[in-house]
C-alpha cells in the first residue's frame, strides 16, 4: 500500500522528485481530477484490503490526532496535530492507523476545495516517509465512531470478551 500512495502521487504529477507538493499544478486541478484522485486513494486505502496485525502497540488515531479537517480545519492546527501524531507514533506505537483525510464533500466553492486539496497533499507528503516506513497507515473506513473503529481492530476472541463484559454490565444495571 505504501508504494501505491507514492505511485498515485507521482502519476498524478502532484509532487516533485523530493516528495514536495507542486503547488502550481495542484491549484490548476479540476474538481473532476480531485475526485478521481481521492477515489483512487480511498480504493487503495480501503479497510477491506488490510490484513490485520494484532498488537498492543498498534493504535487507531482519534479525530483529534488524525490530521484531518475535523475538529478544526485550520492549517496551523492540523500541522500541530501532525507533530503530535509523529510524537505519539515515535513514543507509544509500532503502527498508527489514521483515517484517510482526502475525502471530500463537493458542496463548497471550487476555490475552497482546491485549497483544502492542496493542504491535504502537503500533509500527505509530510506523512509519506512514516507511511513508507510502516509506522503510519492511511485507512479509508466507513464513518465509524472511535469506539466502533477500535472494536474493528481487535480479534474476535477479544471482541466477544468485550461484548460479554458490556452485556454483563447492562444486565447488572437492569437487575439493580
Image (cartoon, helix red, strand yellow):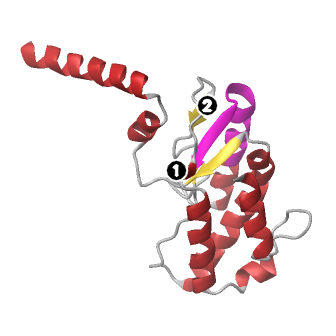
Q: Classify residue 99 as left or right of residue 28.
A: left
Q: Position of residue 9 (x, y in %)?
A: 75, 68
State the image quarter where residue 169 is shown: top left
Q: Which residues are magenta?
A: 82-98
Dot placed on the residue nearer the N-terminal end, 2 or 1: 1
Q: Position of residue 151 (x, y in %)?
A: 42, 34
Residue most extreme to the left: 175
Marker disc for residue 113: none
Residue most extreme to the right: 18
Q: Classify residue 23 as left or right of residue 108.
A: right
Q: Classify residue 158 as left or right of residue 70.
A: left
Q: Position of residue 116 (x, y in %)?
A: 62, 70
Question: Label 2, label 1: how many angstroms apart (C-alpha)?
Answer: 15 Å
- Is 111 included in the stretch rendered in magenta? no
Using the image, determine if residue 112 lies above or below residue 65.
below
Residue situated in front as seen by the camera: 43 or 15: 43
Which residue does the numbered mark 1 point to in the structure image? Answer: 47
The residue under the point 91% across, 67% down is 17
Q: Nearer the viewer, mark 2 or mark 1?
A: 1
Which residue does the numbered mark 2 point to in the structure image? Answer: 58
The residue under the point 77% across, 45% down is 130
Residue situated in front as seen by the camera: 22 or 55: 55
The residue under the point 72% across, 86% down is 28
Instruction: Using a 10 Å C-alpha cutoff, classify the residue at mark 1 as few (fewer than 14 neighbours), some (14 to 19) or many (20 or more).
Output: some
Is residue 13 among what the camera can see? yes
Q: Classify residue 169 as left or right of residue 68.
A: left
Residue situated in front as seen by the camera: 49 or 153: 49
Using the image, determine if residue 118 lies above or below residue 79.
below
Amino acid at each position: 500500500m505504501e508504494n501505491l500512495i507514492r505511485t498515485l502521487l507521482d502519476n498524478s504529477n502532484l509532487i516533485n522528485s523530493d516528495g514536495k507538493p507542486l503547488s502550481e499544478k495542484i491549484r490548476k486541478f479540476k474538481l473532476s481530477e480531485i475526485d478521481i484522485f481521492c477515489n483512487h486513494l480511498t480504493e487503495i486505502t480501503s479497510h477491506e484490503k488490510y490484513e490485520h496485525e494484532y498488537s498492543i502497540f498498534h493504535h487507531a488515531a482519534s479525530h483529534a490526532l488524525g490530521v484531518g479537517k475535523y475538529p478544526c480545519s485550520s492549517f496551523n492546527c492540523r500541522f500541530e496535530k501532525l507533530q503530535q501524531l509523529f510524537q505519539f507514533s515515535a513514543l507509544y506505537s509500532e503502527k498508527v492507523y489514521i483515517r484517510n483525510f482526502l475525502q471530500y464533500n463537493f458542496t463548497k466553492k471550487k476555490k475552497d476545495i482546491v485549497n483544502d486539496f492542496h493542504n491535504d497533499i502537503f500533509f500527505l507528503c509530510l506523512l509519506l516517509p512514516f507511511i513508507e516506513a510502516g509506522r503510519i497507515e492511511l485507512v479509508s473506513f466507513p464513518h465509524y465512531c472511535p469506539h466502533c473503529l477500535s472494536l474493528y481492530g481487535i480479534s474476535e476472541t477479544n471482541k466477544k470478551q468485550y461484548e460479554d463484559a458490556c452485556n454483563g454490565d447492562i444486565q447488572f444495571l437492569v437487575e439493580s
